[in-house]
């Protein structure tokens, strides 16, 4: 019963995605999160592509897929996610933040195949809320690229610092000395960002920077807020500040700050080494900032005219807006940007010899889904997560180009001031005798028209490899009967209903049809008079023997001999059908006096149960007179019928855990008793003892299930010592579990009559 809430379908939208070593350090996995669901995927490659000989066809034939490895349901909506490699750990840990100010550090536990909580943090004290009863701030989690610490911004002004222990060598020494394993976490502490700078309010985004000795956090904020209708009076209100975190001494100096940035800045993206710095995304402009070089910015449309005083260059051939855009670096100087309309651009940071960004190059590569998150997988693969459409796995290929370099140089020449171009043209005809003029020419060559010499441009092509289905957001829903339903299902007493929902947004909108189960497409229909139930049996394809016989109410049967569990061969299935008064197995009628209600198959045994609770077993044997043919022989087990059998299950144990006695005692008795008759006597005594114990516990007793009749001699000619030469060898055993009407469950070993 669900008195308050029932989740009819798990969340399918994806809001966060990271690529980390979730299971172990030997492989990397894609971890996605959407509302309260956490899913782990593995990127698998199609092995059939290696068969193709042509190189071009081999590239086209490869198909990569995302294989879901695990799924976890959480007790809250994920607000932010990050990963970190802790000291001495064999896998990455996940940092999950939940509203209002909760942080959970979890790790995969291979023993339970579940998430293991490493650390829990709760920061919802009243003194941190500053009297606010509502919290609109999302707890952002960021991790240092070198794994030294993590920070979480709560309530817009409080910065939680969670340091990680990095002294791996001392941890190992402590473990050897027997003092126990130290925690991977140092005590967390809170920084009030207003104490660092009184104007540090309204934080927009924050990122850790690359290439600093200590963890350096860059914060993008807007101390005095404005809006587009007021930019004539107040504009360029955003600022950045870089804080160096000395986590041992808890000292946090401001090492870099810059103000008067455009008012519509939305996010920051740290640039990897060796370039370093940060790229600031604004709605109408794009900025590159670095502590050691002057800022560089471009205008992406004409809306920057009159709305900002920040020095911006006009980016030719680009008219885009970066609000709701998502970006990820595919290399240290190239990033992929997905706009709010689904367009995909590749941005190249053009640098000079001093690793200073001098220009941007935009290349429109494709159009895709409306992206909510983006992450790069292994080289050549990109994942676009979406909560408005299907999430996509993309494969991108890079093709270097040479021609656009000259075009870029010509554009740079056109952008130069007239006096600078004149000096450069005149200097080409002068004699290289004046040292001062040569120095001036070298300076112009370094900082002027040769600025693009350090970057190679490339074009990218994207191809969709796989997708993850998303049925949200659901705008409207309706319920009804299916439009096309086979005649066989129309007389079903339970109505077959479907739910049709309007899902997606914009160009990703679609109609999604939800069904309660997989609906088979009926290809053909034929009648089998009197058959009420069926079972499937699996066997090796190369060992299937087919017997055909036509007649009224008869069918085709396919049988096989026993297959060793270690054989990895293709399988083939066949059906066993049940009639009202009998069951046709290999064209052998079996009269049980009542319909067959249940069947359990454990190769080579078939155990059936009738409506009156009678249990019968069939064994697949090799026909002595027919050579390679097989036949089913019936054996009636010697079980009591004081209480009716209502359920049964057959099981084949290959682990050796199911046993009736200690294996060591069996080996000892095998050495003492060499004859087969003495071994059979021991098994008989053992089963008698077991029956006596069951009679004392449950009040009812029965002989061993499926034990051979006493008058039938044993045909086995192989001694037990030869079957099991060593006590370490595990022999497969077959078991049958019976549940009786009085609530007693019996576990019995299945013994062949010939054994």
Image (cartoon, grey):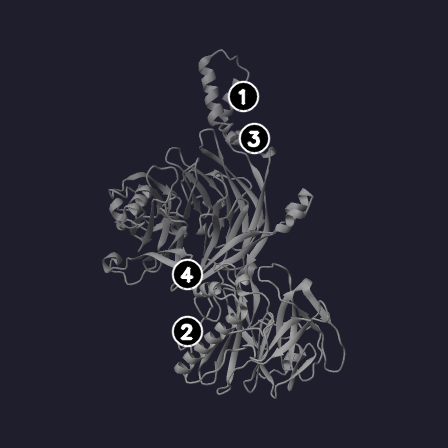
Q: Which residue is mark 2?
A: 5
Pointer 3 or 2: first along the chain: 2
Q: Nearer the viewer, mark 3 or mark 1?
A: 3
**Cβ–Cβ under 8 Å for marks 3 and 2:** no
Q: Quadrant of residue 276?
A: top left
Outermost residue, top direction?
433
Task: Give the quarter of the figure containing the C terminus.
Answer: bottom right
Residue corresponding to mark 4: 112
Residue 425: which disc?
Answer: 1
CA separation in Å, label 1 and label 2: 77 Å
Which callout, 4 or 1, points to the residue nearer the camera? 4
Mark 1 or 2, which is nearer the eye?
Answer: 2
> Would you say 673 lies left or right of 258 here?
right
- Dot placed on the residue nearer the N-terminal end, 1 or 2: 2
Q: Tags 1 and 2 in contact by the CB under 8 Å rule? A: no
Element class at badge 4: loop
Ranked by sequence position, the earlier of labels 3 and 4 is: 4
Q: Nearer the viewer, mark 3 or mark 2?
A: 2
Q: CA distance from mark 4 to mark 1?
A: 74 Å
Q: CA distance from mark 3 to mark 1?
A: 14 Å
Report the Cα–Cα distance between label 3 and label 2.
65 Å
State whether residue 484 appears in this view: no
The x and y percentages for residue 291 are 37, 35
Residue 175, position as x, y percentages in the image: 30, 47
> What crowding class fits label 4: few (fewer than 14 Cα within 10 Å), some (14-19), or many (20 or more)?
few
Please say if 347 is above or below 747. Answer: above
Note whether 407 is above or below 643 in the view shown. Answer: above
Q: Which mark is residue 410?
A: 3
């Amino acid at each position: 019963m669900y008195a308050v809430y029932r989740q009819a379908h798990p969340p399918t939208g994806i809001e966060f995605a990271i690529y980390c070593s979730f299971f172990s350090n030997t492989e990397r996995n894609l971890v996605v999160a959407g509302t309260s669901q956490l899913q782990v995927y593995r990127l698998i490659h199609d092995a059939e592509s290696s068969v193709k000989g042509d190189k071009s066809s081999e590239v086209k034939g490869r198909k990569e897929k995302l294989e879901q490895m695990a799924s976890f349901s959480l007790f809250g909506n994920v607000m932010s996610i990050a990963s970190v490699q802790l000291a001495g750990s064999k896998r990455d840990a996940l940092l999950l933040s939940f509203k209002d100010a909760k942080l959970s550090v979890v790790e995969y536990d291979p023993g339970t195949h579940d998430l293991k909580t490493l650390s829990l943090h709760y920061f919802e004290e009243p003194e941190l809320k500053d009297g606010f009863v509502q919290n609109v701030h999302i707890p952002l989690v960021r991790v240092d690229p070198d794994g030294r610490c993590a920070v979480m911004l709560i309530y817009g002004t409080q910065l939680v610092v969670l340091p990680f222990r990095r002294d791996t060598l001392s941890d190992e020494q402590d473990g050897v000395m027997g003092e126990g394993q130290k925690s991977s976490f140092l005590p967390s502490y809170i920084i009030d960002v207003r104490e660092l700078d009184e104007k540090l309010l309204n934080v927009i985004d924050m990122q850790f920077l690359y290439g600093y000795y200590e963890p350096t956090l860059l914060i993008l904020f807007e101390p005095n807020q404005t809006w587009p209708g007021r930019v004539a009076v107040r504009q360029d209100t955003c600022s950045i500040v870089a804080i160096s975190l000395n986590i041992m001494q808890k000292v946090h100096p401001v090492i870099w700050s810059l103000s008067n940035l455009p008012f519509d800045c939305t996010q920051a993206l740290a640039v990897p080494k060796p370039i370093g710095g940060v790229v600031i995304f604004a709605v109408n402009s794009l900025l590159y900032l670095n502590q050691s070089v002057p800022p560089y910015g471009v205008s992406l449309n004409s809306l920057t005219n009159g709305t900002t005083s920040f020095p911006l260059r006009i980016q030719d051939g680009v008219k885009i807006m970066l609000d709701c855009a998502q970006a990820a670096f595919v290399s240290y100087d190239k990033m992929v940007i997905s706009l709010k309309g689904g367009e995909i651009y590749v941005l190249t940071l053009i640098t000079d010899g001093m690793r200073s960004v001098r220009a941007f190059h935009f290349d429109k590569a494709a159009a895709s889904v409306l992206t909510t998150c983006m992450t790069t997988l292994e080289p050549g693969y990109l994942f676009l997560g979406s909560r408005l459409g299907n999430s996509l796995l993309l494969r991108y290929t890079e093709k270097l180009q040479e021609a656009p370099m000259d075009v870029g140089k010509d554009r740079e020449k056109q952008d130069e001031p007239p006096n600078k171009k004149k000096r450069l043209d005149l200097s080409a005809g002068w004699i290289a005798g004046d040292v001062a003029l040569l120095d001036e020419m070298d300076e112009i060559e370094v900082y002027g028209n040769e600025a693009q010499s350090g970057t190679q441009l490339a074009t990218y092509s994207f191809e969709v490899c796989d997708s993850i289905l998303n049925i949200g957001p659901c705008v409207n829903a309706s319920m009804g009967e299916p439009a096309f339903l086979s005649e066989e299902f129309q007389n079903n007493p339970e109505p077959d209903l479907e739910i049709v929902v309007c899902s997606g947004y914009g160009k990703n909108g679609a109609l999604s049809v939800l069904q309660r189960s997989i609906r088979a497409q009926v290809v053909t229909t034929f009648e089998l008079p009197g058959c009420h139930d069926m079972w499937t049996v699996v066997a090796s394809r190369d060992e299937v023997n087919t017997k055909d016989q036509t007649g009224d109410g008869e069918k085709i049967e396919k049988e096989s001999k026993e297959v060793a569990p270690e054989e990895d061969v293709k399988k083939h299935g066949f059906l066993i059908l049940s009639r009202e008064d009998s069951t046709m197995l290999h064209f052998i009628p079996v009269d049980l006096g009542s319909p067959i209600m249940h069947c359990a198959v454990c190769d080579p045994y078939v155990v059936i149960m009738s409506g009156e609770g009678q249990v019968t077993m069939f064994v697949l044997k090799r026909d002595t007179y027919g050579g390679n043919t097989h036949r089913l022989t019936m054996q009636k087990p010697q079980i009591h019928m004081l209480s009716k059998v209502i359920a049964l299950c057959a099981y084949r144990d290959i682990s050796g855990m199911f046993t009736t006695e200690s294996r060591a005692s069996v080996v000892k008795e095998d050495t003492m008793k060499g004859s087969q008759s003495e071994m059979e006597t021991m098994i008989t005594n053992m089963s008698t003892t077991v029956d006596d114990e069951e009679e004392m516990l449950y009040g009812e007793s029965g002989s061993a299930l499926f034990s051979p009749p006493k008058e039938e001699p044993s045909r086995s000619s192989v001694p037990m010592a030869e079957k099991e030469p060593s006590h370490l060898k595990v022999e497969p055993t077959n078991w049958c579990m019976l549940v009786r009407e009085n609530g007693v469950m019996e576990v019995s070993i299945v013994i062949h009559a010939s054994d």
